[in-house]
Image (cartoon, rainbow, N blue to C red):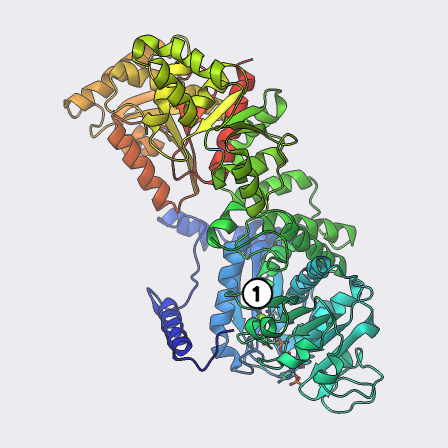
């Protein structure tokens, strides 16, 4: 923790405070709003949504209460409920002042698991009355997340509500924290080489979070007699009268020791869920070798990591803060445990569900890092170890790992009212939420996995995104990568990124500095290009340094089944080598690039984004057909719109005339294709508006293949849509027209995009058999 006294820290704190206040105030007060899921634009909508139409779902729910899950948002709605008596480490600041925290929880639920939240701040401290109020909210919600209610009241309130309510009630400060702490301690002990059955733990704090953590740790195998609890009054011992309650008394030790300083001697684990600065350096010095120091009080930990390091270099440290490694925060758990619980109609959250979540989180940290996380935490060492015991909050795999594990455990413990019948389909559904590209790519992945041709070369084999993609490609059995680069650099970088790939076992390397195929490759290249200005010395040099040329030659020689390049440089740079060595498919005259955009309510394919500057009508017709054929492979029906500034003949500018000529050519060359034009962009995307304007249009419904008149229009439209939609929604570019499976990415390609294009390349290779 930074020293609170330094002016620098005071400045930084003031800046953060100012930024936080602005964040909450602008552009409108608060962090959440309510959005409608249905259209409400005319009298008819009003009649359906409200009186008289709304009576119909009401009557259905009277007949069958379960119909509420069908006709209302209840099944995806959680109440984040507090009385503001223990808000973070700020104490009893009251329900109104706690509202920003509850709104924040709502935002996290929505962002990480798509769950809607009403935050409910209740002005009531009497636990009995609190129970009455919360229990009466059952018709509103699918689940209740209790938040920041002080101990011991929170134990009573949760217990009573669980008895009374038939929906999950979960006090996040207790169980969410306990689950994440449980995962971190399992992993911490693994790193320290210690056994949970013999480890000795000292806790500071005996409140909601601490006691729940200890309870769960006992269930995970930590013997109760190895746990020593301290709080503001010192050690919790048998016979103590001061500040005791039954939950605390469970951990009372028969001992003469009275202070944290005394019981810390020789401890393997310190678990702080109390207040800043409680643990002192001299206490840390007296702990067992390789101690775990979990100083989790917010915002100031029980001891600053710097102070631990000053006295021990073997300690494994976790805090609740974002600015140090190993942030233990219940956000790693609550969005996903509720996702799993809601999706299977769990009536409560059982210990089995909690333990399933613990193991899911622990295992995730031991797997290698995802791209999203690596990007968000650039520069940090993120391989499993002392500085990486638990996943990061932005890890997209948390959802796919925790929610199904929780839903399965709910089923196993007999509390799932609507059990998930097909767990694989459920995972696919969650995957779709996490990666917008999930569903669209499904047929391509299926085609890739069913075939036998699986060797894919990557020109930029040392590139981080390529290596991360290669790990996924191997794990998901999509392909066997051939990485073009320097073998030692590749191996070193794999280790640095915490990836598990092994040369020879999982992937092959073409060593750009020394490969036995070099002579054959340059000689072949020379023979292909000797009448195109390439001399022997040029051929030798090119084959030494042009990675895409090496890749193209591998593909040409049948050493691999597909090639992927383009994580740097321009399309034209890579295409020249592909053209020289691979060439176009028989009968094809033009290369082109198609990009898919996965927008919230539609999928769009755009051509030609990267190759032809100002294609002719003949070229556009060919590109349209190739694009449409590719869309069929995604399992979608292509619906092509030839776009223009002109709408069905209202302009005679050359670009409009060109699109009309393209249509004429397509009518002859591809009578099977649903296509029309030339038309405006809005008319392309809105089938109803098109029918009103052009009742005899040969294109029905919304177009999904947008054929642009030139590269400016295509490239600009694609990049605008991609960026306006928030990024990470693109698949491609898909290279159309090449004689063998090869694709040229763009420098903005993400790991997901590389994996997707790999699947497409393998599917191409299988189709070409
Ligand atoms: N990182 C994370 O994910 C989470 C962190 N927390 C943090 O943990 C802390 C406790 O939260 P929570 O359990 O909800 O709150 P509670 O109010 O329920 O519990 C606080 C506990 O800490 C004890 N305590 C307070 N001051 C001291 C002190 N100086 N020395 C020893 N013990 C002390 C209290 O003792 P007494 O009752 O005797 O006053 C009480 O047992 C907070 O800082 C909170 O922000 C909580 C949840 C999650
Ligand atoms: C993280 C959290 O819930 C708390 O500190 O209260
Ligand atoms: Mg809390």
In-front residue for pair 474/176: 474
**Residue 114 position within the rendered picture, expressed as x and y whole percent measured from the top left:** 53, 53
In-front residue for pair 766/562: 562
Task: For ligand 2, give the image quadrant.
Answer: bottom right
Q: Is residue 635 visible?
A: no
Q: Which residue is mark 1?
A: 79
Q: Is residue 482 visible?
A: yes
Secondary structure, mark 1, is strand
**Residue 467 position within the rendered picture, expressed as x and y whole percent measured from the top left:** 53, 38
Residue plotted at (46% across, 29% down): 459
Q: Is residue 561 left or right of residue 690?
A: right
Q: Is residue 703 left or right of residue 96?
A: left
Q: Is residue 409 left or right of residue 308?
A: right
Residue plotted at (53% across, 43% down): 493
In the rendered image, the quadrant that contains the C terminus is top right
**Residue 551 position within the rendered picture, expressed as x and y whole percent measured from the top left:** 47, 23
**Residue 322 position within the rendered picture, expressed as x and y whole percent measured from the top left:** 51, 65
Q: Is residue 719 above or below residue 280?
A: above
| Crowd rating for badge 1 (residues with CA inside 10 Å; few <14, some 14–19, many 20+) | many
Please identify the residue farthest to the left as the structure is shown.
652
Q: Is residue 30 above or below residue 411?
A: below
| Corner quadrant of residue 259 | bottom right
Residue plotted at (66% across, 48% down): 404
């Amino acid at each position: 923790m930074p020293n609170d006294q330094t002016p620098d820290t005071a400045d930084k704190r003031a800046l953060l405070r100012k930024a936080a206040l602005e964040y909450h105030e602008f552009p409108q007060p608060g962090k959440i709003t309510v959005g409608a899921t249905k259209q409400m634009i005319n009298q008819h909508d009003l009649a359906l949504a409200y009186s008289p139409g709304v009576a119909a779902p009401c009557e259905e729910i009277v007949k069958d209460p379960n119909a509420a899950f069908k006709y209302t948002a209840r099944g995806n709605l959680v109440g984040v409920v507090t009385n503001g008596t223990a808000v973070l480490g700020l104490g009893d600041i009251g329900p109104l002042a706690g509202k920003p925290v509850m709104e924040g929880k709502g935002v996290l639920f929505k962002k990480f698991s798509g769950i809607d939240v009403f935050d409910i701040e209740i002005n009531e401290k009497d636990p009995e009355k609190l129970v009455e109020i919360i229990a009466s909210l059952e018709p509103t919600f699918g689940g209740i997340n209790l938040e920041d209610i002080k101990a011991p009241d929170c134990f009573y309130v949760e217990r009573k509500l669980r008895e009374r309510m038939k929906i999950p009630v979960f006090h996040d400060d207790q169980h969410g924290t306990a689950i994440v702490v449980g995962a971190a301690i399992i992993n911490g002990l693994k790193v320290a080489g210690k056994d949970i059955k013999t480890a000795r733990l000292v806790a500071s704090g005996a409140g909601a979070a601490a006691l729940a953590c200890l309870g769960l740790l006992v269930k995970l195998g930590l013997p109760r007699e190895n746990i020593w609890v301290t709080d503001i009054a010192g050690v919790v011992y048998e016979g103590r009268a001061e500040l005791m309650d039954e939950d605390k008394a469970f951990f009372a030790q028969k001992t003469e020791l009275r202070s944290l300083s005394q019981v810390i001697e020789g401890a393997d684990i310190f678990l702080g869920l109390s207040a800043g600065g409680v643990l002192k350096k001299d206490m840390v010095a007296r702990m067992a070798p390789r101690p775990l120091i979990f100083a989790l009080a917010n915002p100031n930990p029980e001891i600053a990591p710097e102070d631990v390091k000053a006295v021990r270099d073997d300690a494994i440290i976790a805090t609740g803060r974002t600015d140090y490694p190993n942030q233990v925060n219940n956000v790693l758990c609550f969005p996903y445990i509720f996702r799993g619980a809601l999706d299977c109609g769990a009536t409560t959250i059982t210990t089995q569900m909690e333990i399933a979540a613990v193991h899911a989180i622990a295992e995730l940290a031991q797997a290698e890092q995802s791209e999203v996380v690596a990007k968000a935490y650039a520069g940090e060492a993120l391989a499993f170890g002392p500085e990486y015991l638990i996943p990061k909050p932005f890890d997209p795999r948390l959802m796919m790992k925790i929610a199904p594990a929780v839903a399965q455990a709910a089923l196993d413990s007999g509390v799932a009212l609507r059990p998930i019948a097909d767990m694989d389909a459920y995972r696919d559904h969650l995957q779709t939420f996490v990666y917008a590209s999930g569903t669209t790519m499904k047929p391509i992945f299926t085609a890739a996995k069913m075939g036998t041709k699986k060797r894919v070369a990557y020109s930029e084999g040392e590139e981080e995104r390529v290596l991360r993609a290669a790990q996924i490609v191997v794990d998901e059995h999509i392909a066997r990568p051939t990485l073009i680069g320097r073998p030692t650099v590749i191996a070193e970088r794999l280790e640095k990124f915490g990836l598990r790939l092994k040369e020879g076992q999982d992937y092959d390397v073409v060593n750009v500095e020394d490969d036995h195929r070099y002579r054959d490759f340059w000689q072949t290249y020379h023979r292909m290009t000797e009448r195109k200005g390439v001399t022997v010395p040029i051929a030798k040099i090119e084959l030494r340094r042009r990675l895409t040329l090496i890749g193209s030659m591998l593909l040409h020689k049948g050493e691999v089944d597909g090639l992927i390049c383009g994580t740097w440089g321009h399309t034209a740079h890579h295409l020249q080598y592909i053209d020289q060595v691979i060439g176009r498919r028989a009968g094809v005259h033009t290369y082109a690039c198609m990009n898919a955009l996965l927008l919230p309510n539609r999928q769009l394919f755009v051509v030609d984004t990267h190759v032809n500057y100002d294609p002719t009508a003949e070229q556009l017709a060919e590109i349209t057909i190739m694009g449409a054929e590719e869309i069929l492979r995604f399992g979608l029906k292509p619906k092509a719109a030839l776009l223009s500034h002109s709408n069905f003949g209202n302009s005679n500018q050359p670009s409009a005339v060109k699109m009309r000529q393209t249509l004429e050519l397509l009518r002859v060359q591809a009578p099977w294709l649903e296509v029309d034009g030339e038309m405006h962009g809005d008319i392309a995307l809105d089938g109803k508006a098109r029918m009103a304007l052009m009742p005899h249009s040969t294109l029905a419904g919304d177009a999904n293949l947008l054929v642009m008149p030139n590269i400016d229009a295509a490239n600009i439209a694609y990049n605008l849509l991609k960026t306006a939609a928030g990024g990470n929604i693109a698949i491609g570019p898909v290279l159309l027209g090449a004689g063998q499976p090869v694709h040229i990415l763009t420098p903005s390609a993400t790991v997901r995009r590389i994996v997707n294009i790999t699947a497409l390349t393998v599917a191409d290779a299988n189709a070409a058999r």
